[in-house]
Image (cartoon, rainbow, N blue to C red):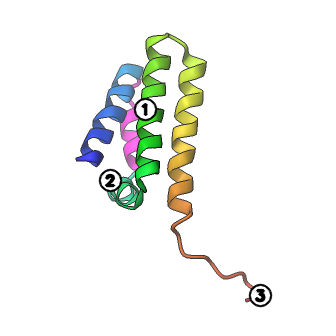
């Protein structure tokens, strides 16, 4: 359910952007299994942080402040990346 709601949230933002190519571009970059796998491994704290970030994006959009909206979305995306990165197996260095 979290994945479906997240997808709807992000799709609404993409639709509101009015950029026809943005949706397919994002779909090619972010695969649903990746998003689902991320949520499956989030702690309660991480899920709450993600929800709070969504609220901040909405507040920025309502305020009509594109710089704030961009900043909030960048932080949200970075948080998702860090959550994924921290769960990837360590890659050995070439000297190992």
Name the residue that disc number 1 marks.
Answer: 54
Q: Earlier in the sequence, mark 2 or mark 3?
A: 2
Q: Give the mark, 3 or 1, whose residue is nearer the N terminus.
A: 1
Marks 2/1: CA distance?
18 Å
Residue 66 vertical placement versus 25 (above, below):
above
Where residue 79 sits: x, y (%)?
54, 47
Eye-nearest disc, 3 or 1: 1
Q: What residue is drawn where x is 42% and y is 42%? A: 48
| The one of 48 and 57 positioned closer to us in this rendering | 48
Residue 76 located left or right of residue 36? right
Question: Is residue 26 within the magenta segment?
Answer: yes
The image's mark for residue 95 is: 3
Residue at x-position 32% and y-position 53%: 32
Quadrant of the frame with the C terminus: bottom right
Q: In the image, is residue 65 above or below residue 40?
A: above
Rendered location of residue 25, percent (x, y): 42, 41
The magenta-colored residue range is: 18-28
**Dominant secondary structure of the residues highlighted in magenta in the image:** helix
């Amino acid at each position: 359910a979290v994945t479906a709601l997240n997808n709807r949230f992000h799709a609404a933002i993409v639709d509101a952007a009015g950029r026809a190519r943005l949706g397919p571009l994002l779909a090619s970059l972010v695969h649903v299994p990746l998003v689902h796998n991320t949520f499956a491994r989030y702690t309660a704290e991480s899920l709450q942080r993600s929800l709070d970030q969504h609220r901040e994006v909405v507040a920025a959009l309502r305020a009509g402040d594109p710089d704030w909206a961009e900043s909030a979305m960048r932080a949200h995306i970075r948080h998702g990346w860090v959550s994924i990165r921290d769960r990837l197996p360590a890659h050995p260095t070439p000297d190992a």
